[in-house]
Image (spheres, rainbow, N blue to C red):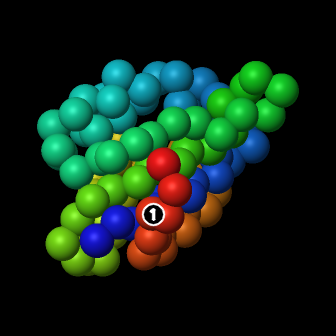
Amino acid sequence: MRVALICTDKPGHLQTRLDNRTAHLAHIGASGVVEMAGPFLNEGAMTGSLVVLNVETLAEAQAWAAADPYAIAGLFESVMISEWKKVIG
């Protein structure tokens, strides 16, 4: 199943994102379940993340999100985790 994570950064936490970016990208690469990912932007500044996972269960997606270095560092104000159906693309 595909699961979308829509993450919104806490205001003023760009440095937290930058400080943890290498570890976040390593987590993405090591997991083998990320189909696509990238930051949301506001006038070019990163303000959140969209991550699409291909996992067996919603619990697996929740565990992936909890282990994300961005989450561990306290970057996110909110995280929505929802099963998602790819239609186009």
- Give the crowd class for mark 1: few <14, some 14-19, many >=20 residues within 10 Å: few
Against 51, is 69 above or below? above
Classify 30 as above or below 20: below
Mark 1, secondary structure of its residue: loop
- Which residue does the numbered mark 1 point to in the structure image? 86
The front one of 9 and 32 is 32
Residue 79 horizontal side relative to residue 52, left or right: right
Which quadrant of the structure image shows residue 69? top left
Where does residue 8 sit, x and y in percent of width and height? 64, 52
User: Looking at the image, which residue sits at the far right?
Assistant: 43
The answer to whether residue 83 is visible is yes
Camera-nearest residue between 3 and 15? 3
Residue drawn at x 75%, y 43% as measured from the top left: 11
Residue that protrudes farthest toward the front in the picture = 88
Picture quadrant where residue 25 is located: top left
The one of 89 and 30 positioned closer to us in this rendering:
89
Residue 22 in the figure: left or right of residue 29: right
Kindly identify the amino acid type of the residue bearing the numbered disc 1.
Lys
46 horizontally vs 67: left or right? right
| Residue 53 image point, x, y percent | 33, 56
Residue 21, percent from left and from top: 42, 26
Q: Residue at x 67, y 48 (%)?
A: 10
Which residue occupies 83% across, 26% down? 43
Above or below, comparing residue 35 to residue 21 in the picture: below
